[in-house]
Amino acid sequence: MSTLSYYTEEGLKKLKDELHSLKTKGRSDMAKQIAEARDKGDLSENAEYDAAKDAQGLLEMKISKLENLVANARLADTSNMDTSIINVLSKAKLKNKKNNAIVEYMFVAEEEADLKTGKISVKSPIGKGLMGKKVGDVAIIEVPAGKIELEVLEVHF
């Protein structure tokens, strides 16, 4: 059983584009590799053929996983969300209480997470620890490096 995940318009489009590419170009390229390997002779001792068939299995697994993600993906509608608390697609300015560093994150679905662009997964320890928090709240979050204290300075969409 899969749970629904909420995406930005850009994130959902990226998922659908990748799925389309794998189903069309990916499958076509894989069929060519298998045909080329098959043309090289005895299949019982053909490592290239075995490798191509294994790669085909991995491709089909990836397609199946993406189909499941897309089937359970929803475009997040921020118009009726409580903007005073951190939620999926919220942006929050946070202060690390230990070193006073200020960071800003957007809370997104796991597949959209990208720390370089400030997008953090709602399923990450920090994401889970901050969901539902509002301005002024302090969250103590267990991360691999120990515990961090983050104060919520701003929340917006």
Image (tube, helix red, strand yellow):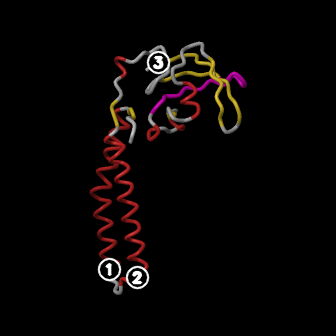
Q: Residues within 10 Å of mark 3 (few under 14, many from 20)?
A: some
Amino acid at the residue labelled 3: His
| Residue 115 in the figure: left or right of residue 59 | right
Q: In the drawing, what numbered circle is on residue 7? A: none
Amino acid at the residue labelled 2: Asn
Number of numbered labels in the structure image: 3
Q: Main secondary structure of the magenta part?
A: strand
Q: Position of residue 107 (x, y in %)?
A: 48, 29
Amino acid at the residue labelled 1: Arg
Picture quarter with the N terminus:
top left
Give the residue at the far bottom of this rendering.
42
Query: Are the residues flagged by discs 2 and 3 in contact, CB closer than 8 Å?
Result: no
Q: Residues within 10 Å of mark 1 (few under 14, many from 20)?
A: some
Q: Earlier in the sequence, mark 2 or mark 3?
A: 2
Q: Residue at x 31, y 44 (%)?
A: 16
| Residue 86 in the figure: left or right of residue 74 | right
Q: Residue at x 31, y 41 (%)?
A: 71
Relative depth, front residue between 60 and 29: 60
Q: In the drawing, what numbered circle is on residue 46? A: 2
Question: Magenta span covers which residues?
Answer: 96-108
Alpha carbons under labels 3 and 1: distance apart: 57 Å
Query: Are the residues flagged by discs 1 and 2 in contact, CB closer than 8 Å?
Result: yes
Q: Residue beneath label 1, please?
A: 38
Which numbered mark, 2 or 3, is in the foreground of this view? Answer: 2
Which numbered mark, 3 or 1, is in the foreground of this view? Answer: 1
Q: Earlier in the sequence, mark 3 or mark 1?
A: 1
Q: Residue beneath label 3, please?
A: 156
Q: Residue at x 53, y 28 (%)?
A: 105
Q: Position of residue 103 (x, y in %)?
A: 59, 26
Query: Are the residues flagged by discs 3 and 1 in contact, CB closer than 8 Å?
Result: no
